[in-house]
Each structure stands twice: as C-alpha cells, then as structure tokens.
Image (spheres, rainbow, N blue to C red):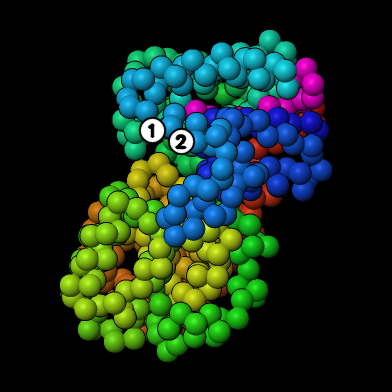
C-alpha cells in the first residue's frame, strides 16, 4: 500500500523517534511510506550532533533554522501562522497526491491543521489521524485561540477515517467534548527492540567507565522541565541518600531545572552520588539505560505517554512512575513497574529508597517489563493496530 505520512512538527527528539518508529514499522509490513515534513524538519534526516549534551543545532540547514524561529514565535502570532499553514499544506499535499496516488494518508494531528482531511475527503483517500495533542488539554504552549482551535478539532476528529489516540484520556476527553467522532484505537508509545536490547551491551565495562562499579543505580532520562518534578525529587532524596550508601542516581538530560539541580548537588557535596551527564543522542540512550538497575519518573501529566517509559521497559529496567491513567494503562503495579500516587513526591522517594536493597524484586519486575514490550508494545504493534481502522483492516 502506498502511504503518505504527514506531520507539522519539528521532527526532533521524542517526536522524531515516534515518527520514525511508525514509518519503519509500516515499511517493515511491506508498505511504501513517504514522509511529508515541514521544510527543514525531516525526522529521517535528524542530525545526532544536534542533540548531544544540549549543544546547538548544527544541522546547517537554513530550513532547520526557519523551523526553530517559527516555533519560538509568541502566542497568537504563532497560532495565526498555524492556521495559514493550511494553505501551504494544500499546495504541497496536492502535489504529492498527484505524484504518488496514495492509498492512505497518515497524519500526526496538529492544532488548526485541517487541510489534509479536506483534501483526502475530496480525493476519497482514507486518512487516519494520530492524536498526541488537543485543544482540550493544558499544553506547554498556552493556547490563545481556543474557540477556533476546538471547532476545527471537532471537524477533524469527526471527518477522519480513523483516529489513533496515545491514551484513553485523550479519547475520553474528545468524546465528552465533541460527541460523535471517527472510529478509534488506543495506541500508546512503543520501543524499537533492535535498538533497546540489553544483550547488546557490556554492562560491566560501561559501569566501570562511568564510575558505577558496585553501585545500585536508579536512573532517569528526559527533559528537565518543571512538570517532570525532577528538581523537587532530587531535593527530597538528597537528604536521605546516607540511608542507602550504595544508591547512586544517574540523571540524563537537559532543561530549565538542571542548573538548580546541579547547584543543589554541588552545595551538598553529592557529586559522587548524583551523576548528570547532560543530554545525549538517542543512539546513546540505550547504553545509559544498560547501566541502570531501575528508573524513576517523578511526575508527568494526565494525557502523555512517556517515550522513555517504553524504552526503559524494553531494556528490562522497570520504572517507578506516577499513577496517571496513560501510565497506569502500561505499568501494572508490582508486575511491570511500580506506581505511586501522583504529586506525592515523598511516596516516590520512599519507593526509590526501598527498592535500593531489593535486588530480586528489581530483576523480577524488570524482566516482566521487557516481556510486556516484546509481546505488545513494539512499533510493529502500533502499525498493525492503525491499519485496522481502514476498510477490510488495511486492504485498500
């Protein structure tokens, strides 16, 4: 089947991982997939150097810089340009439809973007939307034009051939707000088992190189943003590290709260107990996870499906995570991970401390977590699931 994958993201970091995961899985199933991206935002040409250690984007592309400038525009101006991008989409998508004659259009849904559905309906091409964002939820970038965004979203969700929601929270909110919507499936994130395979790594060597021999390592990988709660978590656990002499935290990533965390660790003389290597490329993430005994996610949000959760689980490293619905759909308490009541950081810290001495429990749950990913949450599973939304289960 000939498929166009269309997105309006920057195609970087977690977004790029998700796009590549779905595209590669569809190709693995024998389909011909062409990706149509915002100029300069092709996820299949992502430069690893652009994300290492929080350094600048060295892609060298003027289009890449254009994408970054547009993303940085303030409030209403950015949203007006999002609306205007429908005109660009009509021109670019029309040309690609004429050239490729697709049998399916798969689009990563973006606010205000409706041109693709309009074109698909005119050309009688099935179109499936993947819903990672919504005008109904609290967003990192506050939404100014809420009324128009929700009216457009209602139209899109009711006129698509099918919908792929990353969590039941998104679907429930959409059904409650908009009533009748297109047929849908719930498809959380997934992991690439070829890349996230613990058998690939010499753990003893990696631990020696990183000064982790003889340590019990609790890890975290991700953006150091306020809503992830890592700053509060480190502040609370710093006062208790003496209770677990072998416990070491390895916190990989970068973001706005990292400088404050570094300052706290330095002020308390915990540089040998809390390691912060900075941001690393996606190719290097599995090697860091291989050094970890278990992992922690201090906070999340009500609708997200954290990518790192699946990648940790694929590596046989189970996670302590807040009990938001999208996480609880994936993590079974005491089976494939450990849940604590959301926003209760003290409970999170206590679980980290308890598990520091429970080697068999960590290994048992980690093994079950990997088995779950192998069985149900590879990207191939997501691709097969989205194709069930088409007539005759994907045979167009």
> What is the secondary structure assignment of the residue under circle 1?
loop
Residue 79's place in the image compared with 370, above or below, is above
Write the residue at 29% across / 77% down.
271
Residue 144 — which label? none
Question: Image check: 366 left or right of 352?
Answer: right
How dense is the environment of label 2, judged by Cα within 10 Å: few (below 14), some, or many (20 and up)? some
Question: Image check: 9 left or right of 141?
Answer: right
Q: Quadrant of residue 355?
A: bottom left
Confirm whether residue 140 shows in the render. yes
Magenta span contains residue 99: yes
The span shown in magenta is: 97-110
Q: Quadrant of residue 385?
A: top right
Is 186 in front, or is 248?
248
**Quadrant of the image containing the N terminus:** top right
Calculate the distance from the C-alpha at mark 2 to the C-alpha at mark 1: 6 Å
On the image, the x and y values in percent for residue 380 come to 69, 49
> What is the secondary structure assignment of the residue under circle 2?
helix
Residue 34's place in the image compared with 195, above or below, is above
Is 390 in front, or is 124?
124
Magenta span contains residue 252: no
Write the residue at 32% across / 74% down.
274
Confirm whether residue 185 shows in the render. no
Question: Image check: 276 left or right of 58?
Answer: left
Q: Quadrant of residue 277?
A: bottom left
On the image, the x and y values in percent for residue 266 come to 22, 72
Residue 72 — which label? 1
Q: Which residue matches tag 2?
A: 68
On the image, the x and y values in percent for residue 3 come to 74, 31
- Picture mark count: 2
Write the residue at 79% across / 21% down.
99
């Amino acid at each position: 089947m000939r498929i166009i994958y269309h997105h309006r993201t920057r195609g970087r970091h977690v977004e790029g991982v998700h796009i590549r995961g779905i595209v590669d899985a569809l190709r693995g199933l024998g389909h011909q997939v062409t990706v149509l991206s915002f100029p300069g935002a092709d996820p299949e040409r992502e430069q690893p150097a652009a994300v290492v250690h929080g350094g600048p984007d060295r892609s060298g592309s003027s289009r890449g810089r254009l994408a970054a400038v547009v993303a940085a525009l303030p409030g209403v101006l950015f949203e007006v340009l999002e609306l205007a991008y429908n005109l660009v989409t009509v021109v670019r998508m029309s040309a690609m439809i004429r050239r490729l004659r697709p049998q399916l259009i798969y689009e990563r849904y973006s606010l205000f973007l409706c041109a693709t559905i309009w074109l698909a309906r005119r050309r009688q091409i099935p179109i499936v939307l993947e819903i990672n964002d919504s005008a109904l939820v609290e967003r990192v970038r506050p939404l100014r034009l809420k009324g128009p965004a929700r009216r457009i979203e209602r139209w899109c969700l009711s006129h698509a051939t099918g919908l792929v929601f990353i969590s039941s929270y998104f679907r429930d909110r959409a059904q409650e707000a908009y009533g009748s919507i297109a047929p849908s499936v719930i498809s959380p994130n997934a992991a690439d088992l070829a890349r996230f395979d613990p058998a690939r790594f010499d753990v003893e060597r990696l631990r020696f190189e990183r000064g982790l021999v003889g340590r019990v390592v609790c890890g975290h990988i991700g953006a150091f943003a306020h809503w992830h709660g890592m700053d509060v978590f480190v502040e609370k656990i710093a006062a208790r590290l003496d209770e677990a002499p072998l416990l070491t935290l390895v916190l990989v990533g970068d973001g706005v709260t990292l400088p404050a965390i570094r300052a706290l660790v330095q002020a308390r003389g915990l540089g040998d107990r809390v390691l912060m290597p900075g941001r690393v490329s996606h190719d290097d993430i599995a090697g860091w996870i291989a050094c970890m005994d278990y992992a922690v996610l201090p906070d999340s949000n009500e609708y997200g499906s954290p990518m790192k959760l699946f990648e940790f689980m694929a590596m046989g490293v189970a996670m302590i995570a807040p009990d938001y619905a999208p996480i609880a759909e994936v993590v079974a308490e005491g089976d494939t991970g450990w849940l604590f009541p959301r926003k209760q950081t003290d409970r999170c810290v206590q679980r980290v401390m308890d598990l520091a001495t429970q080697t068999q429990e960590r290994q048992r749950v980690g093994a079950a977590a990997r088995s779950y990913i192998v069985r149900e949450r590879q990207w191939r599973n997501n691709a097969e699931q989205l194709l069930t939304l088409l007539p005759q289960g994907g045979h167009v």
